[in-house]
């Protein structure tokens, strides 16, 4: 059984996490953030040790391991009955991060819609990331070089995911609008999809 899924997609600082947490608080949505997956890794497991081995050396973690960690988190949510895939829609943010991960996840998720939180104004994103890092006391992340590197990585590695899923599944939303307005646009799109298809009603 493939999990019916909405993906929140956008550059760092576009508000994916904010929207994901809000959607996750609404009945019939289950939110899974990639950052939460990494924070909850059990390093006693084989895949957890493999992740630690790569990350401790500063190496990129292979897509297969990243997706396996994500799958373990989803399986735990299903077994713990916090995610009920027969009635809930999965909301992802931060994964898939590249086309390789998207291809691996094809056998696990049925992507109903990709919400592209678009923010062409890179200066606005830059300021958002800087403010967020300072607010969370992550001073290293407030470094201009670090921010530029993260935005460049998004452009080269992550943005091609939009092309992989195709325009017919993408809803583009202006991420510079207030969070409540962004959420309203997402929910309007969700309801349009529900009314025009056989997807389960989400709200």
Image: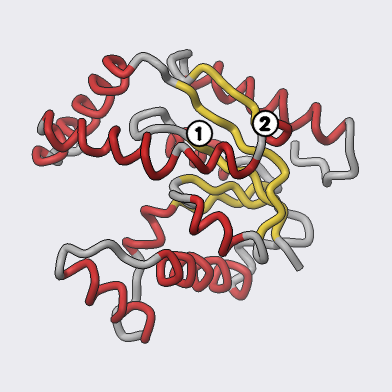
Relative to 97, 88 lies left or right: right
User: In the rendering, at what x and y percent does residue 143 appear?
Assistant: 10, 33
SS under mark 2: helix
Which is more N-terminal, label 2 or label 1? 1
SS under mark 1: helix
To which residue does mark 1 refer? Answer: 19
User: In the rendering, at what x and y percent does residue 79 appear?
Assistant: 61, 75
Crowding around mark 1 (Cα neighbors within 10 Å: few <14, some 14 to 19, many 20+) is many
Report the label total.
2
Disc 1 versus disc 2: distance between alpha carbons? Answer: 21 Å
Q: Quadrant of the C terminus?
A: top right
Quarter occupied by residue 164: top right
- At a point 21% along the width and 25% down the height, the residue shown is 131
Crowding around mark 2 (Cα neighbors within 10 Å: few <14, some 14 to 19, many 20+) is few
User: In the rendering, at what x and y percent does residue 110 appear?
Assistant: 71, 54
* Residue 188 vs residue 60, the one in the foreground: 60
Quarter occupied by residue 53: bottom left
- At a point 34% along the width and 34% down the height, the residue shown is 12
- At a point 90% along the width and 44% down the height, the residue shown is 198
Up the image or down, 188 lies above or below 141; here it is: above
To which residue does mark 2 refer? Answer: 167
* Residue 66 vs residue 27, the one in the foreground: 66
Relative to 12, 175 lies left or right: right
């Amino acid at each position: 059984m493939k999990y019916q899924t909405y993906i929140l997609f956008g550059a760092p600082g576009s508000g994916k996490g904010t929207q994901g947490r809000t959607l996750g608080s609404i009945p019939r949505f289950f939110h899974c953030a990639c950052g939460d997956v990494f924070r909850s890794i059990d390093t006693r497991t084989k895949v957890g040790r493999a992740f630690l081995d790569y990350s401790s050396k500063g190496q990129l973690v292979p897509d297969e391991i990243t997706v396996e960690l994500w799958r373990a988190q989803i399986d735990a949510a299903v077994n713990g009955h916090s995610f009920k895939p027969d009635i809930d829609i999965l909301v992802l943010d931060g994964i898939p991060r590249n086309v390789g991960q998207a291809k691996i996840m094809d056998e696990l998720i049925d992507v109903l819609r990709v919400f592209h939180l678009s923010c062409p104004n890179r200066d606005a994103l830059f300021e958002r990331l800087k403010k967020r890092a300072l607010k969370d006391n992550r001073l290293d992340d407030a470094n201009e070089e670090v921010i530029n590197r993260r935005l460049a990585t998004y452009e080269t590695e992550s943005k091609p995911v939009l092309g992989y899923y195709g325009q017919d599944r993408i809803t583009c939303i202006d991420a510079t609008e207030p969070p409540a307005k962004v959420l309203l646009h997402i929910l309007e799109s969700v309801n349009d999809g529900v009314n025009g298809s056989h997807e389960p009603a989400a709200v």
